[in-house]
Image: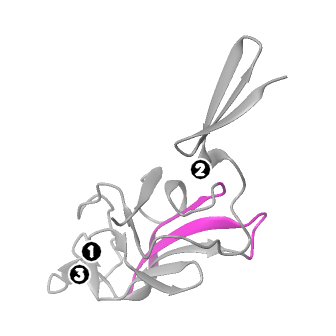
Amino acid sequence: MGNIQFLNEKVLFTAADNKVAMSADCCCAAPCTCPAGLAAGYRLVGYTDGDLVACDSCDDDLSMTVWDGSFPTLISGCNWQEQSNRRINGKQAVAGADQTLKLDVEGDPVCKWIIVIYCSYPATEIWAGEKTTGLSPEGTYTRTGGCDTTAELEVEAIP
């Protein structure tokens, strides 16, 4: 019979001659209700303007402040957004739902964490992705759509 140990948010299972380590992010499916104790804001790890390529159809706007890859405002429940007008790679992205990180409780087929990043005029999806595991939005999101072809984005809590 194996032993289960908890060490620095990791689960370590030992049995006979093998050991399996699993991070807390992989421990379970994404929840279908918003868990308590989450960070006030999140951001894309190491993001700089130009990491995402906005769609050609998005309107140019160099007058807005560059988006820094953050979702700093908790709107409600498990829904974080950028609330100031920003630009992504020289293209207009207005505040609010245009840059969203949230828990999708509609679940298709299961509950999941999602990121959706749009440009505003015309409304065009730049990048969308999901993460179906973990009790927090932190972790790796896999692309599901958008004109930018970046395969994965990593999310961390804003310190």
The three-letter code of the residue at mark 1 reads Trp
Q: Residue at x 29, y 54 (%)?
A: 46
Look at mark 3 in the image and give the residue it sits on: 60
Res. 122 visible in picture: no
Q: Residue at x 75, y 70 (%)?
A: 107
Residue 91 vertical placement versus 132 (above, below): below
Q: Nearer the viewer, residue 122 or 139?
A: 139
Residue 68 vertical placement versus 10 (above, below): below
**73 displayed left or right of 76:** left
The three-letter code of the residue at mark 2 reads Asp
Start-end of magenta stretch:
106-133
Specify the label residue 25 is tagged with. 2
The 10 Å Cα crowd at callout 1, few under 14, some 14 to 19, many 20 or more, is many
Is residue 130 within the magenta segment?
yes
**147 displayed left or right of 11:** left
Q: Nearer the viewer, mark 2 or mark 1?
A: 2
Name the spot of residue 16 as percent of width and height, x first: 77, 13
Q: Quadrant of the C terminus?
A: bottom left
Q: Quadrant of the N terminus?
A: top right
Specify the label residue 67 is tagged with. 1
Name the spot of residue 115 as percent of width and height, x first: 51, 68
Q: Quadrant of residue 10?
A: top right
